């Protein structure tokens, strides 16, 4: 943007700002002279009784999918650090996986359970 266009833009912006400012702050009405809006009285409404909702119990599939890859990685990493690398390989083999990311997400909970049992 060249300086001429910037100068024109600044003038237009300043003009619009001054116009908006005068409309808001220099109006002939003062807060005391403004008429109060008519307020209708509302009837008091009692809330209706609603039946208590039953607590939704998590489905077994939902609980199983709650285990994330980082959680499983952490658990298997702890086993590996503890010198149980063969156990980690057995857990992976149980899911026909060569690496952790090969385990299906639906099996994370079962793999985590196996890792915790081996710890």
Image (cartoon, rainbow, N blue to C red):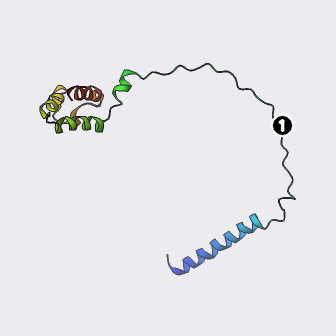
- Residue underneath mark 1: 41
Residue 72: x and y, percent?
27, 34
Classify mark 1: residues with Cα within 10 Å, few (<14), some (14-19) or many (20+). few
Instruction: Identify which residue is drawn at 62% across, 18% down.
Output: 51
Q: Is 91 displayed left or right of 17 in the figure? A: left
Instruction: Identify which residue is drawn at 55% across, 77% down.
Output: 6
Q: Is 48 displayed left or right of 107 in the figure? A: right
Residue 55: x and y, percent?
51, 21
Considering only vertical position in the picture, is 25 above or below 85? below
Instruction: Name the residue nearer the viewer: 14 or 93.
Output: 93
- Report the residue that reaches farthest toward the left: 86
Residue 29: x and y, percent?
84, 62
Q: Is 119 displayed left or right of 49 in the figure? A: left
Instruction: Name the residue nearer the viewer: 101 or 16.
Output: 101
Residue 27: x and y, percent?
80, 65
Considering only vertical position in the picture, is 81 above or below 19? above
Quadrant containing the C terminus is top left
Q: Is mark 1 on a helix, strand or loop?
A: loop
- Residue 61: quarter of image: top left
- Residue 22: quarter of image: bottom right
- Residue 19: quarter of image: bottom right
- Report the residue that reaches farthest toward the bottom: 4
* Total marks placed: 1
Instruction: Identify which residue is drawn at 17% across, 39% down.
Output: 81
């Amino acid at each position: 943007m060249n300086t001429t266009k910037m100068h024109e833009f600044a003038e237009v912006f300043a003009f619009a700002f001054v116009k908006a400012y005068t409309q808001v702050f220099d109006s002939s009405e003062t807060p005391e002279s403004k008429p109060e809006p008519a307020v209708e009285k509302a009837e008091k409404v009692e809330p209706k009784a609603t039946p208590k909702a039953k607590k939704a119990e998590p489905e077994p599939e939902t609980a199983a999918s709650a285990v994330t890859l980082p959680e499983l990685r952490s658990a298997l990493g702890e086993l590996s650090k503890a010198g149980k690398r063969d156990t980690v390989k057995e857990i992976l083999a149980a899911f026909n996986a060569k690496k952790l990311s090969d385990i299906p997400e639906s099996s994370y909970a079962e793999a985590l359970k196996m890792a915790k049992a081996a710890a």
